[in-house]
Amino acid sequence: MTIVDTPERRQLRELTRAFVTREVLPHLDDWERAGEVPRELHATAAKIGLLGIGFPESVGGSGGDLLDSIIVTEEIIRSGGSSGLVAALFTHGIALPHMVAAAGRRTDGLGGWIAGKLGDGRTAADDDLIERYARPTLAGTMIGALAITEPDGGSDVAAIRTTARRDGDHYVVNGSKTYITSGVRADFVTTAVCTDFPGSGELSLLVIEKGTPGFTVGRRLEKLGWHCSDTAELSFVDVRVPVANRIGEENTGFLAIMQHFAAERLSLATQAYATAQRCVELAATWCRHRSTFGRPLASRQLVRHRLAEMHTRAEAARAYVHDVAARVAAGEPVVTEVAMAKNVAVSACDWVVDQALQLHGGFGYLRDAEVERHYRDARILGIGGGTTEIMNEIIAKGMGL
């Protein structure tokens, strides 16, 4: 299977490229230094229909599915953007899908099939969350984040220790989260909490608004890469959250999180192969024009063969990710294949960006070089959404080991 290149998708690619050229490239270096992208960029992306791709019109989205979302991610990076920009601008891609699915708003994109797994237990409260959070976010007037990871939890989602104790029509939340993408700018955080004893695995998802007493955004975390994507620590001390802010039924959070990991991992895989493709293009252009000892670098067989191998690995990763994504969109339960797609794409990206920087020589080590940013940004892709080691464990289980 593959992603069919329809006229609508070709137009989507053109729209994305124009957006990056006009709204991103003149400012990306400044955003990298500032440590965040401006809120206005969300509104601009929403106005042209880009922000809502993959979300149904019934919740304020632009329609389309998971495959259309992959096209947008791919084109942002191939047009000179970065995976850090994708993380910052499209954080709602991990903050909203559980909410959309719980409200029964079916879509073949970023979370509709979760609803099929959880059943049709929608409530008026779930519909209310759509109006209060999903629509404004997809309109670019609010920013949402997803808070799962904890300081001592890492990839072990079931071991979450942030608790939510029921007290009448509220939950009282205590705990902390870390490595939260867009945590500094977010107006609300879709938060994984334990609704039983800590570490029990009985999880629920609560929407917690910034400004709620007891909810504090800690220090902005400085990172190796993804500089334009703000990352924060969050703290919850006796935070009272209305029960109406719970997404779906109590104790269904773990399943919702697990089901959505497929879309998140495919997004990261897309960022990986697209970064590799962009670095191949940058390196090939550099080698055509950079001369040493009186000859262009590209005139040397060693360099040409290196570029050929880089191109091969990037294109092979793209083809496999597209195949797996098309199967996910078709409703196939391909958990093992998603893990393999992420690892294949990350492995290709790691090698290609390293070779691309090497071919750029000393210039590749400078902040003025686009390839330098991709080199730094690529390192997180084998960590976020489940580490390479976690993916290998999933693959091993799929093999019956």
Image: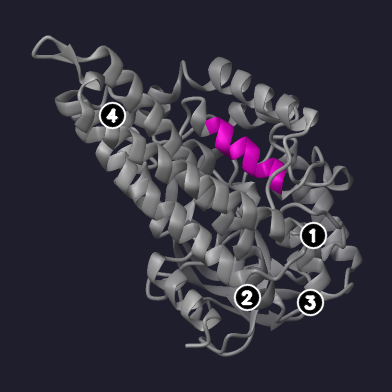
Q: Whole-Å distance between the Cαs marked 2 and 3?
A: 17 Å
| Mark-to-mark CA distance, 4 and 1 | 45 Å
Q: Kindly identify which residue carries mark 4.
A: 304
Query: Which of the marked residues, 2 or 1, is nearer the chain's N terminus?
Result: 1
| Residue at 77% across, 59% down | 330
Q: Examine the rendered structure and indicate whether residue 164 appears above or below residue 359.
A: below
Where is mark 3, residue-wise?
A: 249
Q: Which residues are magenta?
A: 67-76
Q: Amino acid at mark 4?
A: Arg
Closer to the observer: label 2 or label 4?
A: 4
Relative placement, left or right, of 309 versus 114 is: left
**Mark toward the start of the polypeptide (2 vs 3):** 2
Instruction: Choose mark 2 or mark 3, whichever is in front.
Output: 3
User: Label 4's element?
Assistant: helix
**Mark 3 element type:** loop
Of labels 4 and 3, the one closer to you: 4
Point out the tag, 4 or 3, that comes first from the N-terminus.
3
Q: CA distance from mark 4 to mark 3?
A: 57 Å
> Mark 2 near mark 1, Cβ–Cβ under 8 Å?
no
Residue under circle 1?
112
